[in-house]
Amino acid sequence: MKHLLTGTAGFIGFHLAKRMLERGDEVVGLDCINDYYDVNLKYARLEQTGIDRNKIENGKFVQSIKYPNYRFIKLKLEDRKAILKLFEQEKFDKVCNLAAQAGVRYSLQNPFTYIDSNISGFLNILEGCRHNGVRHLAYASSSSVYGLNEEMPFSVHHNVDHPISLYAASKKSNELMAHTYSYLYGIPTTGLRFFTVYGPWGRPDMALFLFTKAIIEGKPIDVYNNGNMQRDFTYIDDIVEGIVRVIDNPPVGNPEWTGKQPDPGTSVAPYKVYNIGNSKPVKLLDFIEAIEEALGKKAIQNFLPLQPGDVPATWADVSDLVSDLDYQPNTDIRIGVKRFVEWYKEFLMIDNNPKIKL
């Protein structure tokens, strides 16, 4: 199988690429390497998969020196001509689109970036799949699509028509766009609603990274909603295991689906949406305690109100993924946090000073 994986300089995409390469798949990785956060971390991830940063040029392939079955290309999803040319030349069997402009709070100040990357860029991916016989498109959605929904745990069979950030709206739009292409053109598509992914090589704008860095430096951490937050923190290895199982199993239409009682999570078309989470919500204060335990140092906590676009709690119902693909997330929060802290100290610190300023 020949796979296109987008976002391979990013957190989840990097880990997924490694997993698929190590099992022998042919992979083309794609990323625009934007400066949403320090590009040095993105280049460092690529170097872990044998991609020489000095050889990276826009629109040109770089062959991995570590994996003979891996090539990387720097491209923006919104570059329509380049994306469609890539699909025409490479004839991918399957595509996993993880590239996107991430971040809920960032979307409040930079809305147009989300339309360019997450809407226009995703349309280019869909068109590439449509015209080149792609057998399955899996793509990143987000737990943020649940928005104002307060029914717990969050289920893919719930209505998600009330997002509260443009980031969430862009991910909900991706699901609607994918369904349209599944229905019109028979392209199997699967949306992946990720729940607060964490682990080594994670994003610097995420809570675990921010908290660890601040605690080490003796600086206060911002604790939103006065600590009354819960998140379905999911370790990266569990996320990747779920993605691989999804990629390997394209959806088929649900013969029991009816327009009189429409199920949001399935369709008469070859379309499916899954939650990928741990299904065990953790209180934010317990999460901070796990970081303190791993670091052997207490945090200075600055309690703040709930931020615009944030929700107080997330909790994934992963029963569909369990029943369909035998998905079993099992990484305890303390183990996962400990692994992150060990990586942070090894990769980012020399004598308690940062190697890379993030």
Image (spheres, helix red, strand yellow):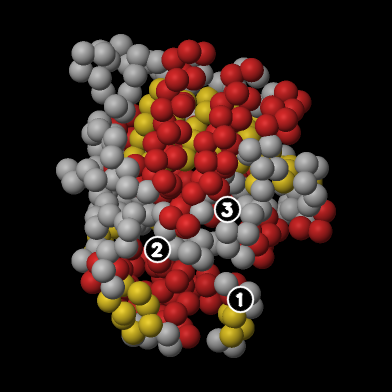
What is the spatial separation of the Cα atoms under label 2 and label 3, in whole angstroms? 19 Å
- Answer left or right for 253 relative to 27: left
Up the image or down, 184 lies above or below 310; here it is above
> Can I make out residue 71 in this image?
yes
Element at label 2: helix
What is the spatial separation of the Cα atoms under label 2 and label 1, in whole angstroms? 23 Å
- Answer left or right for 263 relative to 16: left
Q: Earlier in the sequence, mark 2 or mark 3?
A: 3
What residue sits right under mark 2 in the picture?
336
Question: Residue at position x 78%, y 56% from top?
Answer: 52
Q: List x then y, in percent, for residue 227.
A: 24, 70
Up the image or down, 229 lies above or below 247; here it is below
Element at label 1: loop
Task: Report the disc number at residue 10.
Answer: 3
Question: Residue at position x 23%, y 34% from top?
Answer: 158
- Answer left or right for 205 relative to 162: right
What residue sits right under mark 1 in the picture?
357
Q: Earlier in the sequence, mark 2 or mark 1?
A: 2
Identity of the amino acid at label 2? Gly
